[in-house]
């Protein structure tokens, strides 16, 4: 396939993924916004008024948790979109038709990743708009914010693809968000500063990669806790490259691609 044909193939997959999200928009976009609104009500408005700013790097508690809630929405929805969509293609065997077509595997991967990024970023924007009803947000570093948001959505879209490749049934695409991503997100310091934790739990949080993603996003929005910014961004770029190459390899050789 020449460049123009590859471009049209990529845009076709992206269009399919976006259409899929828009067609079930109330199932895709509404639940995460409602969930985050409940977090704002319970943790921000009710509990937050009793937490001094000395525990949250000098900012109001409801502002402190905002970047973490937004990022939690982005990464979770990026993952869910690619894992469910890719496995659905496997289940219907349409992915096999795409693999045997002249279309390169990297075009297929890029199409699904763009679909995950679309859903993650749109949900993130909706959560930001919803959060304005509860608190005032002012972005301190726009370039960092956009870089972290897009790199994170790409990364978790690729993890979702990895899950979709190995999944054998629909149950296999639900346990990773519930038993891996969600616990790691809560351990990452969404609702608290890890500096307030006992030594053991603080050390455990420092091993959590999502902690650094949320810290970078918090720095971009609030200007606090950005000590590991450069290293974290470089690691995130490196992980995206590694996972893309690994998914590309699995697309060609994994038995999980063919039921």
Image (spheres, rainbow, N blue to C red):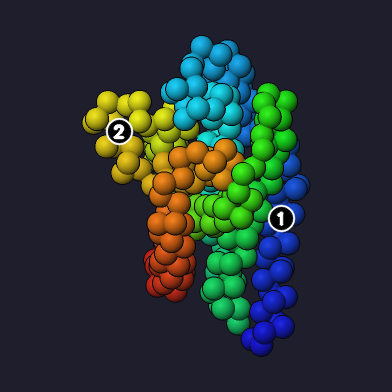
248 versus 144 height, above or below? below
Q: Residue at x 49, y 16 (%)?
A: 51
Q: Closer to the camera, 72 or 247?
A: 72
Q: Work out whether residue 139 can be spotted.
A: yes
- For mark 1, what is the residue? 18
Q: Closer to the camera, 102 or 203?
A: 203
Q: Work out whether residue 258 can be spotted.
A: no
- For mark 2, what is the residue? 202
Rendered location of residue 140, percent (x, y): 62, 44
Q: Residue at x 54, y 73 (%)?
A: 106
Category of crowding for the residue at label 2, using alpha-carbon neighbours closer than 10 angstroms: few (below 14), some (14–19), many (at least 20): some
In which image quadrant can residue 31 be found?
A: top right
Considering the image in quadrants, where does the N terminus appear? bottom right
241 versus 232 height, above or below? below
Rendered location of residue 250, percent (x, y): 42, 68
Category of crowding for the residue at label 1, using alpha-carbon neighbours closer than 10 angstroms: few (below 14), some (14–19), many (at least 20): some
Rendered location of residue 30, percent (x, y): 70, 34
Q: Residue at x 57, y 56 (%)?
A: 147
Label 1, label 2: how far apart the Cα atoms are:
40 Å
Name the element at disc 2: helix
146 versus 37 height, above or below? below
Q: Earlier in the sequence, mark 1 or mark 2?
A: 1
Q: Residue at x 76, y 47 (%)?
A: 23
Name the element at disc 1: helix
Rendered location of residue 188, percent (x, y): 41, 37
């Amino acid at each position: 396939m020449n460049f123009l044909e590859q471009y049209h193939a990529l845009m076709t997959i992206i269009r399919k993924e976006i259409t899929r999200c828009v067609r079930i928009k109330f199932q895709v976009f509404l639940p995460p916004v409602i969930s985050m609104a409940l977090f704002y009500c319970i943790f921000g408005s009710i509990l937050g008024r009793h937490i001094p700013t000395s525990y949250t790097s000098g900012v109001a508690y409801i502002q402190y948790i905002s970047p973490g809630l937004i990022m939690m929405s982005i990464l979770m929805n990026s993952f869910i979109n690619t894992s469910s969509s890719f496995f659905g293609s496997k289940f219907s065997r349409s992915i096999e038709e795409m693999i045997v077509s002249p279309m390169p595997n990297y075009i297929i991967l890029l199409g699904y990743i763009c679909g995950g990024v679309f859903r993650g970023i749109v949900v993130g924007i909706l959560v930001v708009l919803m959060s304005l009803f509860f608190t005032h947000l002012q972005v301190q570093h726009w370039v960092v914010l956009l870089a972290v948001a897009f790199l994170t959505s790409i990364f978790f879209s690729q993890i979702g693809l990895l899950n979709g490749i190995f999944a054998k049934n629909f149950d296999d695409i639900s346990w990773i968000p519930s038993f891996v991503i969600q616990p790691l997100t809560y351990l990452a310091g969404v609702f608290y500063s890890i500096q307030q934790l006992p030594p053991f739990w603080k050390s455990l949080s420092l091993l959590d990669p999502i902690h650094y993603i949320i810290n970078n996003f918090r720095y971009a929005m609030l200007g606090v806790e950005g000590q590991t910014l450069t290293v974290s961004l470089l690691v995130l770029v490196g992980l995206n490259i590694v996972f893309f190459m690994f998914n590309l390899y699995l697309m060609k050789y994994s038995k999980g691609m063919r039921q």
